[in-house]
Image (spheres, rainbow, N blue to C red):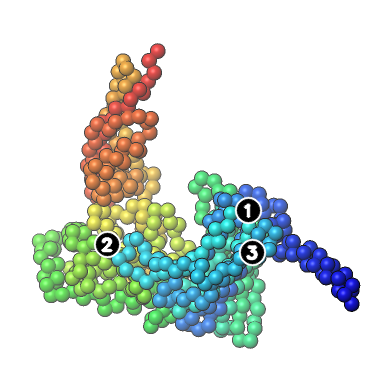
Amino acid sequence: MKKIVALIIPVFIFCFSVFATEGEYAASKIPASLLKNANAVIRFDETKAELKSLEKIIINYRYVITILNELGDRFAQAKEFYDKFQGIEKFEGTLYDANGIKIKFLKKGDIQDLSATSGMSLADDNRVKTHNFSYRKYPYTVEYEIEVEQRQTMFFPKWIPVQTESLSVQFSSLIMITPSDYVLRFRVFNYSENPAIKNIEGKKEYSWSIRNYDAIKLEYASPSFYKITPSVFLAPSDFVIEDYKGNMSDWKELGKFQYSLNKGLNNLTGEMKIKVQNIINGLKSEREKTFALYQFLQKNTRYVSIQLGVGGWRPFDATYVSTKGYGDCKALSNYMHSLLKEAGIKSYYTLIKAGDDEDDIITDFPSRQFNHAILCVPTNNDTIWLECTDQYKSPGYMGGFTGNRHALLITEEGGVLVSTPNYGKNENLQNRSIEAKLDANGFLFTEIKTNYTGMQQDNLHMLLNNLSKDKVKEYLDEELDFATYTVNNFDYKENKGELPGIDEKLSVTVDHYATIS
């Protein structure tokens, strides 16, 4: 018996060692085409969401990524945010070596639990759980599985498998499960097939997937990834957040929901009503009154972000802002709306997707795509747009932050999609004249005069109104396109208006500009 056992054991060990040399996620199993221009490869990626009720969605994310080099290390980090409306039910991870062999499991103590409060927010309830295996033997593979419970249904997941350059995809899928009678809304980009749909025991399952998608190398000024790669955006029809119910099947219905959130928040104290009347006393036109009240807002309030619970979408009431002297974009816009209402001037609280580098919203897909609030004041001759968070911006000017895009007016009848002012080649100008003298030693003495208008003055406007003169000098000392130079004098004059401008005067000496021969 001992001899037989001695013969069997070595064979068993040999077979096991051969089997274990290469796992399912071995880097050698990646198709060659996916390695080109790639720093990492998504081996498997599945987002599976189920609408349990109008109050709850369960979303499971499972993904496996092979990191090819140090430029791909950032993909080894997992990060999931949570707050009052979202809880993290599962956070698991596994590390594999180049052969796809498991070498480490994520332990509970390895997960960091951090505050995710924005630097711009005075208070919010955002937190984040995060982990990074920090392995540096390339290639290596990480696997994460995260499950969250959303205690609201105003937001559904979106699927953008390729979210950055130098990342290829072996397999990725999105699965959405709803009650069979629920109307799921979706908008697809660069995906020609209809979703695969299954009906299972009173539920409907929708799914989209892609395989073997090569890494992309972006060119300058390339559009967002969802515009050039397969992508799917989901949105609800009926939804619930906290105790508020709504529908976003069209922009009108979404506007009705926001109007219900804002209802009853326009009350001003008797003292403030008297102050409004004093401000507009003697002014004849609605335009003059609007500008005067806007200047009052700018001088007496400041922007402070407070995002707690449904307060992320519902403004603080006007009395709160009047008393405290601060508020976020929603609160300040609602306060300005209340001031104008007391003056007998109609205005509309307006939702918009703000940001100098942000895409416009998807106009044919009604959904909650906004991150900012502004105010629209229609007049007899024109429309005045007000950015209520900026203490220095000219009334009527939107600039690159909120100009050239669509916004949603919130009216009593519902939402109305409109366009903000467009700033094109005739508005965004930079005119410059330079007088220069070159001396016998190769030094260049210059007097530079520049006029910036429209979006060309946006960054300079921000610098002048937020930095000291010394800091502006430091900026100029670094930004001019000369090897060595000295800014002797500088002067700026801002020209307020619905198309603002800035006049700049610089006196600059450039050392050794020319070589003497």
Q: Residue at x 14, y 70 (%)?
A: 272
Q: Residue at x 31, y 15 (%)?
A: 440
Residue at the limit of the structure toward the bottom, as seen here: 201
At label 3, which amino acid type do we have?
A: Ile
| Disc 3/disc 1 C-alpha distance (Å) | 14 Å
Residue at the limit of the structure toward the top, as seen here: 517
Residue indicated by mark 3: 103
At label 1, which amino acid type do we have?
A: Tyr
- Mark 1 vs 2, N-terminal side: 1
Q: Residue at x 12, y 63 (%)?
A: 279
Residue indicated by mark 2: 303
Which percent across, then down, holds residue 500? Answer: 27, 48
| Disc 1/disc 2 C-alpha distance (Å) | 47 Å
Query: Which one is closest to the eye, mark 1 or mark 2?
Result: 1
Residue indicated by mark 1: 138
| Disc 2/disc 3 C-alpha distance (Å) | 49 Å
At label 2, which amino acid type do we have?
A: Tyr
Q: How many neighbours does mark 2 have within 10 angstroms: few (below 14), some (14-19), or many (20 or more)?
A: many
- Name the quadrant containing residue 5: bottom right
Cβ–Cβ under 8 Å for marks 2 and 3: no
